[in-house]
Amino acid sequence: MNVFLVEDNEDTASALGALFELEGIGFHCARSGAEALSAFTSGAHAAAPPDVLMLDLFLPDMAGAALVEKLAHVTAVPPIVLHSAASTSEIDEVACAIGAVATLRKPCSARDLVAATRRAAAQSDPVAPIV
């Protein structure tokens, strides 16, 4: 299983990367929406496309929802797990709009994060966002 993580906080990205490695989950991390968009459009993941897009709601250059909308114009978007420190109601609202299959409020337990990631990866079809 491969996760594409979009997370601007270096400490959070490092912690999640260590957790994924411990769990045997492959991952790639982008620190901004532009970096994520570039990785998807460059074909860098063509050989092993991500099974899950784990996305922070607030990125330094664009909102997570805007990134999903841009990605949907250029590629199939893998199942989305929203991972954010925003309020639960805000996370749920965006999750519904972009078709996220799971939401996690930071901080969350490693067990919940891994379980949500595995459930999302089990989705057979990419998610088509409502735009």
Image (cartoon, rainbow, N blue to C red):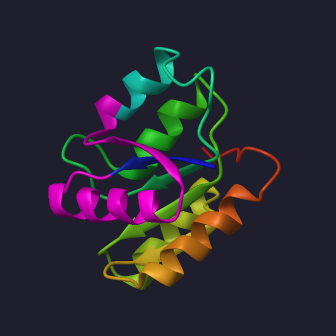
Outermost residue toward the right?
A: 124
**Stretch in magenta:** 7-35
Asked if residue 87 lies left or right of residue 44, the reply is left
Decide whether residue 25 is among the magenta residues: yes
Q: In the displayed structure, would residue 29 be above or below residue 118? A: above
Counting from the top left corner in percent of width and height, residue 12 is at 24, 64
Q: Is residue 66 above or below residue 79?
A: above
Give the camera-side residue of 66 and 33: 33
Q: Nearer the viewer, residue 83 or 109?
A: 109
In this picture, residue 127 sits left or right of residue 49: right
Q: In the picture, residue 48 is in which quadrant?
A: top right
Q: Is residue 62 above or below residue 40?
A: below
Asked which quadrant contains residue 33, the reply is top left
Report the side of 85 relative to 130 (left or right): left
State the residue at coordinates (43%, 79%).
110
Residue 8 within the segment the image draws in magenta: yes
| Residue 62 horizontal/vertical position (percent) | 28, 43
Query: Residue 88: x and y, percent?
Result: 42, 83
> Where does residue 57 sit, x and y in percent of width and height?
36, 60
Picture quarter containing residue 90? Answer: bottom left
Report the residue at 42% width, 40% height from top.
67
Is residue 57 visible to the viewer in this orientation of the structure? no
> In the orientation shown, which residue stands out farthest toward the top?
42
| Drawn side of residue 9 relative to residue 4, left or right | left
The residue that appears at 48% across and 64% down in the rendered structure is 82
* Quadrant the C terminus occupies: top right
| Total residue callouts | 0
- Residue 128 seen in this snapshot: yes
